[in-house]
Amino acid sequence: MARPNQAKIDLHALLHNLGVARSCAPRSRVMAVVKANAYGHGAVAVARALEKAVDALAVASIEEAFTLREAGVACPVLLLEGIFDAGELLACATQGFWVVVENERQLDWLERSQLPRPVESCWLKVDTGMHRLGVAPSQAAEFHRRLLDCKNVSDHVVTCTHFASADLLDSVQTPQQIELFNQVTADLPGPRSAANSPGVLAWPAAHYDWIRPGYMLYGDSPFEAPQPNADRLLPVMTLCSEVISVRDVPAGETVGYGATWRAERDSRIATVTAGYGDGYPRTAVNGTPVLIAGQRASLAGRVSMDMITVDVTDLEDVDIGDEAILWGEELPVGEVARCAGTIGYELLTRMPPRTPRVVVRG
Ligand SMILES: *Cc1c(COP(=O)(O)O)cnc(C)c1O
């Protein structure tokens, strides 16, 4: 018998969520974002499931791109931050890695390199308000022309930008960024791209030629408020474990490190083998929902490295061996994240190697 905790990965749900993205933006090509180990789900399994169904994949670094190539994933892979030194360009040209160009230094490297063949596609990033990466709107035309003139760049030059607030459904910044991007690209040839997951789901004016969904593919809503497209998503990861101990705790007694939870009535506490060493956030507060044998119960006491304790007083017949779901089916990761002062993106991405990923529907 092995320790029963695992992250079940439902690749069927992944493809369903890709279908939601396509139905939102039927005229756009799809670049699926699989950076950070596919948001913690396992980059190779996710990329293999997606590669025939998408037009390209995207990662954060050439190391992540090589991981995919070494596993036999053959489709184009965009490096979302571009390259970090000129030496990476040779591999980009020969391996079919596409590069973002977001500053003068990266463009210089492209112009000065001797490559056996051009880089297949360059994505010129324009800063329309995120103020993190990208060239200024006033520089976009010159960069675009230099890329088209560059012998090391094919003529597939995409102009792209990134949203700062698209996850806020009433954001005023997003329409401003779209408007500025339209102005900047009005006279530029070639495809355009702007939409991350919230852009795909809720901002049709941002779809352009390529969409770049990440988080939504993994099946949780990027919005706090209900949103009709996001409500169709299915969670890909279900983090589950089992009850390994059950005990009665009399009123007045406390549970766990630091005695931060006190029984207000005679209580029943179930101990589940999953803690912050398994990716469950230590910052989750008392009352955070946990599903025990399919029923909602509440976290009681501090999260330990390997265990949590759950108040199951109001549940019937809880026993050792009962299934515990920490997030996933019937319990959105974003809801748990809010109870832990963070976002679902972080909980998924931080999932440690110790937690086995088990593909359940491939
Ligand atoms: C991570 C990333 C995305 C995907 O964002 P989600 O909110 O996860 O969909 C898209 N574009 C860029 C440039 C990114 O870095």
Image: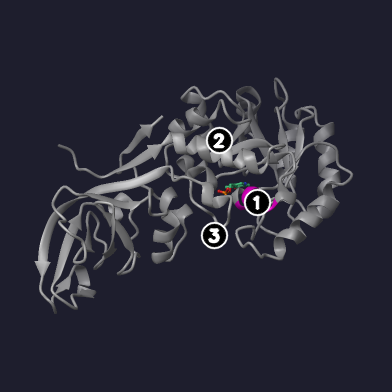
Of marks 1 and 3, which one's residue comes earlier in the chain?
Answer: 1
Residue, disc 3: 226
Residue under the point 23% across and 62% down: 310
Asked which quadrant contains residue 187, the reply is top right
Q: Is residue 36 visible?
A: yes
Residue under the point 25% across and 45% down: 5
As helix, strand or loop, the secondary structure at mark 1 comes to helix
Give the CA separation, mark 1 to mark 3. 15 Å
Residue 233 x %, y %: 51, 46
Residue 327 x %, y %: 36, 52
As helix, strand or loop, the secondary structure at mark 3 comes to loop
Q: Which mark is residue 199?
A: 1
Residue 198 x %, y %: 61, 53
Q: Nearer the viewer, residue 159 or 207?
A: 207
Most frequent secondary structure within the magenta stretch = helix
Position of 16 with respect to 54 (left or right) is: left
Q: Do tag 1 and tag 3 residues touch (Cβ < 8 Å)?
A: no
Residue, disc 2: 62
Of marks 2 and 3, which one's residue comes earlier in the chain?
Answer: 2
Of marks 1 and 2, which one's residue comes earlier in the chain?
Answer: 2
Disc 1: residue Cβ within 8 A of ligand 1's nearest atom? yes
Position of 340 with respect to 135 (left or right) is: left
Render colour scheme: one colour
Q: Does the magenta stretch include residue 201?
A: yes
Q: Please give the range of residues in magenta.
A: 198-203
Give the CA separation, mark 2 to mark 3. 36 Å
